Image (cartoon, rainbow, N blue to C red):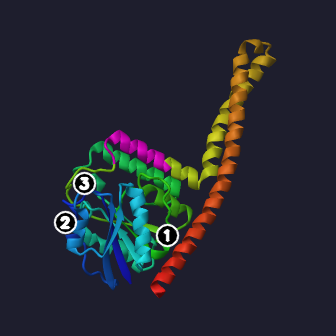
Amino acid sequence: MKLIIQIPCYNEAETLEIALNDLPKEINGIDDIEVLIINDGSKDNTVEVARKWGVNHIVNFKRNKGLAKGFMAGIDACLRNGADIIVNTDADNQYNGSDIEKLVQPILEEKADIVIGERPIAETEHFSPLKKKLQKFGSWVVRKASKSDIPDAPSGFRAYSREAAMQMNVANEYTYTLETIVQAGRNKISMTSVPIRTNGELRPSRLFSSMFGYVKKSMLTILRAFMMYKPLMFFTFLGSVLFGVGAIIGIRFLIFFIMGTGNGHIQSLILASILLLIGFQTFVIGLQADLISANRKILEDIQYRVRKMDYDQTNKD
C-alpha cells in the first residue's frame, strides 16, 4: 500500500521544510510513504529546498496556474507513480502532519474513499469572527449542494483513495475544495470527515486578498458547481420563481380587466408576459443544461477509464 503526500507550492521556500519535517515517516497499514510537490511557478528556491530535503517527485509549472490546476496535476502525477492513497496538505504547515494517519484510516478500513480533515475553526485564533461565520455558511451551502454531511468543506487537508482520485475533475481555476465535494456527492462517492489539529499561522493566506474576494470567489465556485452537477434543479427553481411572479401579476391584471379597469394596468400585462416567457425559457435552458451534464458524466467515465488504463500500464511496466 503506497501513500503519496502531495503539497502545492508557490514561493514556499521559507515554510516548506517546516511542513516536510512534520510529515509522518511511518503509518500502520502503509508500506511506502512518498512526497510530491507541485511547484506552481515559484520565483524563489522552493524546488531547491524540496530537492535538498529529499522529496520523491516534483511537478513543475513554468508560470503560476493556481491552486485548482496544481491540485489536478498533482493527482495525475500521484496516480502515475502508483499511489493507492493520496493526501493533500499545505506547504505553510497549517495542518498537523501527524494527523495524516487519522485521515487515511477510514480508507484503509474501507469505510470511505474521501476523508476531509475538520479543522477546529471556532478555536482558530487567526480566523476573524467574520471568516468563521463565512466558513460555516459556505460549508452549509456545500452540504446542501452535495447532499453530504462534511462539516468543513474549505479544508484542504484531505485524503483520496485511488478510485476516488481517478474520478476527480476540477473545472474552476480558483480552488478544488468545494467543487470536488459537490462532484463526489453527485457521483455518490463515499465521504467522511475526521477532526484534525492546526498549527499556528506562519504567513497570511495567499488564496484571497480580501474577505470580499474570498466570499465572492467561494460563492461563485459553489454556484457554478451546483449549475454543473444539478442544472435541471437549479434552472427549474429559477424558472419557477420567474414564472410564478409573472403568473401572479397576470392574474392581478385579469382581475382588474374583469372589473373593467384593465386599461390602466397595461404595464402589468407586459411585465407578466415578459416574466412568463423568461420563466419558460429558463426551464428550457435547464433541460439543455441537463443534457450537457449527462454528456459531462460520460466524459468523466471516459477520463476515469483512461486514468485506470494509464495506472495499470505504468505499474505493469
**Residue labelled with disc 3:** 123
Residue 8 location, x and y as percent?
Answer: 33, 62
**In this view, 76 is above or below 181:** below
Give the amino acid at mark 1: Ser
* Alpha carbons under labels 2 and 3: distance apart: 23 Å
What residue span does the magenta drawing correspond to? 208-222
Left/right placement of residue 64 relative to residue 302 reads left
Q: Nearer the viewer, mark 1 or mark 2?
A: 2
Image disc number at residue 18: 2
Residue 151 at least partly seen: no
Residue 301 location, x and y as percent?
Answer: 59, 69
Image disc number at residue 190: 1
Give the amino acid at mark 2: Ile
- Using a 10 Å C-alpha cutoff, classify the residue at mark 1 as few (fewer than 14 neighbours), some (14 to 19) or many (20 or more): some
Q: Residue at x 29, y 62 (%)?
A: 90
Q: Nearer the viewer, mark 3 or mark 1?
A: 1
